[in-house]
Amino acid sequence: MQVKVKICGITNPDDARAAVDFGADALGFVFFAGSPRCVSPEVAAAIIGKLPPFTATIGVFVNEEPKQVEKTITATGIDVVQFHGEEPPEMCAISRRLIKAIRIKSLESLDPLEHYKNIVSAFLLDTFTPDLFGGTGRIFNWDVATYAKQFGNIILAGGLTPENVANAVRHVRPYAVDVSSGVESEKGKKDHKKMKAFIEKAKGV
């Protein structure tokens, strides 16, 4: 099966449309105020409302109150929720399909997956950095991601670029890959040439 591609950190209509035109399967919208890629529900709703059909939209939240998550879902119409913080399993009862992000330091970082595997649609594996919840631009040991596939669908993130994504896909054979900083010209703005190359390289494996 051909790998899916998620372009995360979308902040404007031009980047959203270009990502779709280049073949992205999903777009990610960050609703975490601590991120330079954060967008308001109003901005996200305006972008999503102009997307062509069959493009998946994913809302990224970090340690957000469940009521606020549901409010944002209603306001934007996002298809899938991604929890990227330290949300426990009991906080994961929401009205949308769920991706749980796990920040990887070592093989032991996968221990929590057992508690979420019957709740989530996929796990997103990102590189652990003490002061960041994603967008680190750093890779982790991809052997850990290969091992994690026994727990469910794996979305590989963390330091992926047009230069290394093909190797990542061949090594891990994940369900999907996720990129944000690796295709940016500056934080919150995508480089369309990099974005096109990333999608082509990922799907060309």
Image: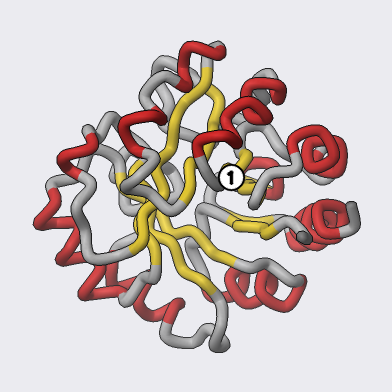
Furthest-left residue in view? 67
- Residue at horizontal 35%, vertical 76%? 45
Q: Who's the residue at 54% across and 88% down the image? A: 53
List x then y, in percent, for residue 151. 50, 36
Assign the N terminus to one quadrant of the image.
bottom right
**Could you tell whether 120 is left or right of 16 in the image?**
left
Q: Position of residue 164 (x, y in %)?
A: 83, 36
Frontmost residue, 88 versus 23: 88
- Asked if residue 44 shows in the view, the reply is yes
Horizontal and vertical percent for residue 161? 76, 41
Question: Residue 126 is drawn in which quadrant?
Answer: top right
Secondary structure beneath disc 1? strand
Of residue 26 and residue 149, the one placed in the foreground of this image is: 149
Residue 163 showing in the rendered view: no
Vertical placement of 76 versus 83: above or below? below
Query: Disc 1 marks which amino acid?
Result: Ile
Q: Residue at x 48, y 48 (%)?
A: 122
Query: Which residue lies under the disc numbered 1?
Result: 155
Q: In the visual, does 129 lie left or right of 89? A: right
Name the residue located 86 percent from the left edge and 36 percent from the top edge: 167
The image quadrant of residue 8 is bottom right
Q: Residues within 10 Å of mark 1 (few under 14, many from 20)?
A: many
Task: Please say which color scheme the image uses.
Answer: secondary structure
